[in-house]
Image (cartoon, rainbow, N blue to C red):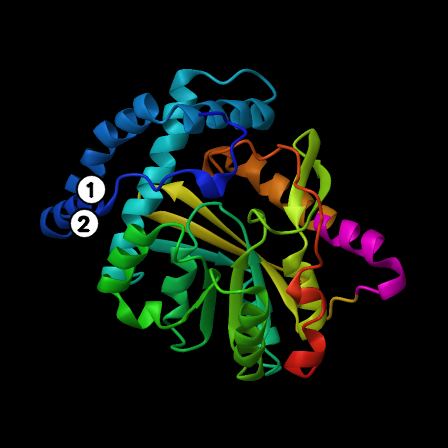
C-alpha cells in the first residue's frame, strides 16, 4: 500500500471488537491499566501498518529537520493511541479526571456573547475531545462537524458512551449543502461550530501553501463557509502534554471573513497560509501531537467543481 494513497481509502484501525476490548479494559480496569495496554497496541500498529509508519517517519523528519528514528515513530503512534484512550474517559467521566489548561478561552467567550455563532477551526492535533469536555460546561453550545462514516466503529463506541454528544454532531458525510445549512442553523442559535481545517476529503477543492518546508494542500471549504456565514472565526489547538494533561489554545482569526469574488484565489491563499503558519507553530511546540498518518504533501486532485459552500450564502439567508 502506497504512502501516497488518499487518507479516506485507509481502513479504520482495530475494528469493533478491538475498540470494545479497549473500552472494557479501560472502564473496568481504570486508566492506569488502559495506558499499560497502549504499549503492545503501539508496537502492533508500528509493525502492521506500514503506510502509517512511513508517513509518520516522513512527517517527523520535516518537523525535526533530520531523519526520524524508529523510537520517535513509536512515540508518535503512542501519543495518538493515548489520546484515543482518553476519548473514552473524557466522554464517560468528562474533564474531572484530567487537567485541562485553557489559553484564550475568554476571547472565545467574548465572541460567543455576540450571539451570532462562532466557527472554531481546529486540526488533527492532540485531542478535540478535550474541547468537547469543556464544552459540557455550557450544554448545547458546541456542535462538531465530524465524518461518522470514516470511523464507524469508533463513532459507535463514543456515542454509546455519551449519546448527548452524538446528538451535537453535524455529520460531514452529508452533501456540502446539507452540512452548510446545518452549520448556518447552529450559528443562528448562537452555537460554536467546530471543524477540522487541515485535511481535505477526496472530492474537495484544495489549494496549496507552504507548510513545514514544502507546498501542501489544504481544503478551501472551511473558508468559503466562513465567508458565507459571516460569523467570527477562532482557531483552536488542542495539545496533549502527557499524563492526564491537555492544553486548549484559542486564537481569534477574524470577526468576519471576506473573500471578494474578483480576488477569490489570493484571499483564500492568504487565509490558508495564515492557518498553516499557526498550525506549523504548534507542531514545533508539540511535534508528536499531529495525527495525519498519510502523505499530507501529496499532489492535490484537480479542482473540477466549485464546492457547495461557495454558493450556499443565498440558501442560508446571509
Question: In the rendered structure, are the residues bearing label 1 and label 2 in contact, judged by CB atoms less than 8 Å apart?
Answer: no
The numbered mark, 1 or 2, whose residue comes first in the sequence reads 1
Question: Residue 232 appears at what percent x and percent y?
Answer: 66, 70
> Could you say which is closer to the camera, residue 110 or residue 36?
36
Farthest-out residue, left? 28
Q: Is residue 237 above or below residue 215?
A: below
Question: Residue 205 appears at what percent x and percent y?
Answer: 67, 51
Q: Residue, x 29% and y 49% (percent of image)?
A: 86
Q: Is residue 24 above or below residue 62?
A: below
Farthest-out residue, right? 262
Q: Quadrant of residue 229?
A: bottom right
Does residue 300 belong to the magenta stretch? no
The residue pinned by badge 2 equals 23
The residue pinned by badge 1 equals 18
Q: Residue, x 35% and y 54% (percent of image)?
A: 99
Count of residue discs: 2
Q: Residue, x 48% and y 45% (percent of image)?
A: 125
Mark 1 lies on a secondary structure that is helix
Question: Residue 290 appears at what percent x and percent y?
Answer: 49, 39
Does residue 268 belong to the magenta stretch? yes
> Could you say which is closer to the camera, residue 291 or residue 283?
291
Label 2 environment density (alpha carbons within 10 Å; few <14, some 14–19, many ≥20) = many
Confirm whether residue 217 shows in the render: yes
Q: Give the range drawn in magenta.
A: 259-272
Question: Residue 113 appears at what percent x and percent y?
Answer: 58, 81
Amino acid at each position: 500500500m502506497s504512502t501516497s494513497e488518499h487518507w479516506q481509502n485507509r481502513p479504520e484501525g482495530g475494528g469493533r471488537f478491538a475498540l470494545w476490548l479497549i473500552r472494557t479494559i479501560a472502564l473496568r480496569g481504570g486508566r492506569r491499566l488502559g495506558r499499560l495496554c497502549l504499549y503492545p497496541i503501539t508496537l502492533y500498529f508500528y509493525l502492521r501498518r506500514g503506510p502509517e509508519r512511513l508517513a509518520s517517519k516522513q512527517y517527523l523528519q520535516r518537523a525535526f529537520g533530520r531523519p526520524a528514528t524508529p523510537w520517535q515513530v513509536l512515540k508518535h503512534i503512542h501519543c495518538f493511541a493515548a489520546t484515543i484512550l482518553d476519548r473514552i474517559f473524557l466522554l464517560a467521566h468528562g474533564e474531572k479526571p484530567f487537567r485541562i489548561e485553557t489559553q484564550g478561552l475568554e476571547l472565545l467567550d467574548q465572541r460567543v456573547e455576540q450571539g451570532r455563532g462562532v466557527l472554531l477551526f481546529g486540526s488533527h492535533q492532540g485531542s478535540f475531545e478535550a474541547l468537547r469536555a469543556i464544552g459540557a460546561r455550557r450544554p448545547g453550545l458546541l456542535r462538531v462537524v465530524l465524518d461518522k462514516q470514516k470511523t464507524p466503529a469508533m463513532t459507535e463506541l463514543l456515542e454509546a458512551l455519551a449519546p448527548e454528544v452524538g446528538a451535537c454532531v453535524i455529520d460531514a458525510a452529508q452533501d456540502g449543502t446539507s452540512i452548510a445549512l446545518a452549520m448556518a442553523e447552529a450559528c443562528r442559535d448562537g452555537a460554536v461550530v467546530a471543524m477540522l481545517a487541515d485535511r481535505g476529503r477526496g472530492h474537495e477543492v484544495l489549494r496549496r501553501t507552504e507548510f513545514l518546508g514544502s507546498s501542501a494542500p489544504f481544503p478551501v471549504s472551511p473558508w468559503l463557509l466562513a465567508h458565507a456565514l459571516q460569523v467570527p472565526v477562532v482557531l483552536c489547538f488542542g495539545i496533549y502534554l502527557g499524563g492526564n494533561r491537555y492544553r486548549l489554545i484559542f486564537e481569534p482569526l477574524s470577526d468576519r471573513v471576506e473573500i471578494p469574488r474578483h480576488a477569490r484565489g489570493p484571499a483564500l491563499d492568504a487565509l490558508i497560509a495564515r492557518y498553516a503558519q499557526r498550525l506549523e507553530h504548534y507542531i514545533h511546540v508539540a511535534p508528536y501531537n499531529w495525527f495525519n498518518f498519510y502523505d499530507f504533501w501529496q499532489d492535490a486532485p484537480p479542482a473540477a467543481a466549485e464546492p457547495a459552500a461557495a454558493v450556499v450564502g443565498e440558501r442560508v439567508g446571509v
